[in-house]
Image (cartoon, rainbow, N blue to C red):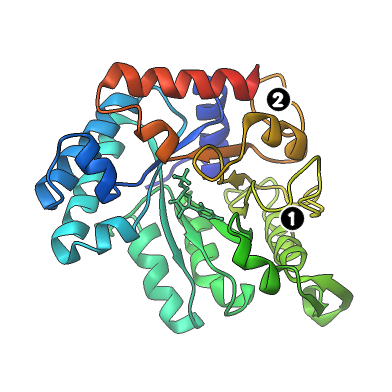
Amino acid sequence: MSRAPFRARLADAVAEHGPLCVGIDPHPGLLKAWDLDVDVAGLESFTHRVIDALAGHVALLKPQVALYETFGSAGLGVLERALAHAREAGVLTLADAKRGDIGSTMAAYAHAWLADDAPLAADAVTLSPYLGVGALAPALDLAVATGRGVFVLTRTSNPEAAGVQSAQAWVAGPGGSPRGMREVAQSVIDALADHNAAHAGGPGEGTAGAVVGLTRGTTGRDHGLDLSALGGPILVPGLGAQGGTPADVAAAFGAPGPSGALGADGGPVVPVSAREVLTSGPSHRALRAAVDALNGTLTG
Ligand SMILES: O=c1ccn([C@@H]2O[C@H](COP(=O)(O)O)[C@@H](O)[C@H]2O)c(=O)[nH]1
């Protein structure tokens, strides 16, 4: 099936609804707070309620795959039906699966989340680059072919990540040309930028997005990364429950552009909130009000 590139579809959705991505994170405590049992039926009710409340109201929904996997095959069944429901309701989905493996196994992960005929296909998937960005090629290639997207972890929002992601490494550029010493997180951004540059103006334009977390060391622009050449969307987790604020988003990524999308360099920049929005549920009206309030402050 031919569809517009994910980045263009995301930019349109952000222009229509605002930049916020809502995480669907059905933690046991949230199920209980919504008066649901902590079982597969509760998981299903919670998930479909979020989709019914927010489809047509938010740019992107991000189900957290771990919270479905924990229920085994029945939980993955709930996720499969949820992704189909979201597709029918016309809202973009990002499966937060953080996959990454050697190339031959990566091809199976890529098919699972990004192929047209895959039961769990989403509009985009999160990937981990710590087996090498090159090992992610099957996912990047399939995303280009199917008009889907990937978001690769670069600087995550958790404090434990600094030791690996901020380490200095000697890295080669395209074709083995010397690039020199780089922070690991920046070297991942550089590789994603190379991928996007190779597809500029084509059907895979902006396929490679980056995850740049909000809360660790972000005051002003001191996430410390040069995102100017990325040419893809940026997912910014850490808003709300992890302590990040809309002011931190603006300080780190710049003021909203004319379409309401944050960030001048590439983008769109899509801040994520799960628990802060979800604790306002289960009423549809309250969930929408929480999204409106956050989108208002993010673009205000
Ligand atoms: O660096 C990262 C990458 C992913 N996440 C995920 O985003 C949500 C955040 O949930 P909140 O309730 O808004 O804190 C969650 O699914 C994380 O696994 C992240 O937080 N940081």
Q: Quadrant of the C terminus?
A: top right
Name the residue located 82 percent from the left edge and 53 percent from the top edge. Answer: 226
Nearer-the-camera pick, 270 or 206:
270
User: According to the image, label 1 marks what residue?
Assistant: 197
User: According to the image, label 2 marks what residue?
Assistant: 256
Name the residue located 71 percent from the left edge and 47 percent from the top edge. Answer: 231
Could you tell whether 5 is left or right of 52 in the image? right
Where is residue 292? Give x, y as percent. Answer: 47, 18
Between disc 1 and disc 2, the foreground one is 2
Q: CA distance from mark 1 to mark 2?
A: 24 Å
Instruction: Say which quarter of the image contains residue 37.
Output: top left
Q: Mark 1, residues whose alpha carbon is within 10 Å: few (<14), some, or many (≥20)?
A: some
Q: Mark 1 near ligand 1 (CB under 8 Å)?
A: no
- Could you tell which of marks 1 and 2 lies nearer the N-terminus? 1
Nearer-the-camera pick, 276 or 59:
276
Q: Can residue 152 be seen in the rendering of this structure?
A: yes
Could you tell whether 78 is left or right of 92 in the image? left
Name the residue located 20 percent from the left edge and 41 percent from the top edge. Answer: 32
Where is residue 198? Give x, y as percent. Answer: 71, 59
Could you tell whether 146 is left or right of 161 in the image? left
Q: Can residue 83 be seen in the rendering of this structure?
A: no
Q: Amino acid at mark 1?
A: Ala
Q: Is residue 210 above or below residue 258?
A: below
Where is residue 117? Give x, y as percent. Answer: 28, 58
Could you tell whether 266 is left or right of 241 in the image? right
Q: Amino acid at mark 2?
A: Pro
Q: Identify the element where label 2 is drawn.
A: loop
Q: Identify the element where label 1 is drawn.
A: helix
Nearer-the-camera pick, 285 or 114:
285
Q: Mark 2, residues whose alpha carbon is within 10 Å: few (<14), some, or many (≥20)?
A: some
